[in-house]
Image: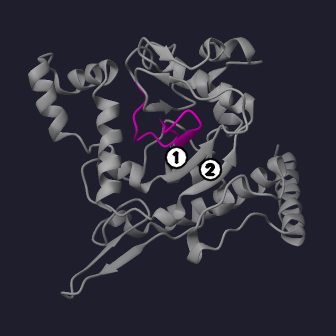
Amino acid sequence: MDSFQSFLTFVSIQKLRTPKGLYQLSKLTNTRSKPTLLIVLQKLSQMHCAIWCDAVWEIVSAEASPTKFVLTDHPVTQYNMGAFPGSKKYGGANDPDLRFAGTHTLVPLTSDKLLILTNLSWARNPYQNPMGQHPNQVLMRDTLFNATKVQTGRLLTEEEVLKINFIMKSRAYRFVAASEGDWLFPEKRLGTTHWSSFGKEWLLMPEPRNLFMGGETYVGYQNGRSEAWGPYGHKPWEREFKNERRKARESETLERFQDEFAAKFGPTYRSHSDEFGGRKINNDGPEYFAFRMKRHEERRARGRRSN
């Protein structure tokens, strides 16, 4: 657990201690003094960690792609389909807020491996406003992380790697590096670089069929003390610990998303997790996939009639 905390703190600091990150920090603290900024950085070194612990983690691979991941001078990259990097509000050093529902965080691990963190509320309901609020806006708080839910096994196509490289390049501050010169210009090989298209095609989304409702976690200690957290890090005395209205809405949208995802990508899951005692679920099975497709078509038919 100490090594995980160290890794998460390292990633958080890596996001802050870059020219772009320090510029954002200077705006947040209203100071340009470098010694002061470094002191603030130490105090805020874990400011992203709680939100990331509540997120859905997926490690994707470029092993099957001739093109590998690039590296930028702002390696911890944030993508939100509603925050165009060419705009005045979200261009330059202005990343979209981590607490926007539709914000993904991209963390390159090696030239072949990339960690994608997706806010749970977005993974359960990608039909909401991507600029809407995360259910828990508190940054500096304690929370719990379940490592068995980390999704792995997804092999990216070369086109998907190119799109991710374009995202990381677009959110870089000044510099991009790669092992091959051609990798520095992914936009030359892509049919479209329309910013919102990457979100609409679910490029960065985890496998939703690995997701389930609920998520309250209870921990008991030897001294008799106990603690609990909701799926978004709320404690039992907070009103949002069990929000039945949100739970009902997300249950409906998650089911819809799972069915649409299955219709687009087929019965075989793009990734898997070790939840439920290490049992890896890799596909829907013929009968359940047929049930999903029937339910998906019925939902589409109702949508056409309502229009």
Q: Position of residue 193 (x, y in %)?
A: 67, 18
Kind of residue indicated by mark 2? Pro
Query: Label 2, label 1: how many angstroms apart (C-alpha)?
Result: 7 Å
Question: What residue is shown with label 1?
Answer: 118
Quadrant the C terminus occupies: top right
Task: Tell me if residue 15 can be seen.
Answer: yes
Crowdedness near tag 2: few (<14), some (14–19) or many (≥20) residues, C-alpha within 10 Å:
many
Could you tell me what secondary structure mostly forms the magenta stretch?
A: loop
How many numbered dots are placed on residues in this image?
Answer: 2
Q: Quadrant of the N terminus?
A: bottom left
Image side of residue 174 versus residue 302, left or right: left
Residue 252: tell me if it is visible: no
Relative height, residue 87 to residue 127 (above, below): above
* Residue 215 in the image, given as x and y percentages of width and height: 48, 69
Is 297 part of what is drawn in magenta?
A: no
Q: Is residue 236 above or below residue 35?
A: below
Residue 185: quadrant of the picture: top right
Q: To which residue does mark 2 refer?
A: 206
Magenta span includes 113: yes
The secondary element bearing badge 2 is classed as loop
Residue 22: image tag: none
Which contiguous range is marked in magenta? 95-115
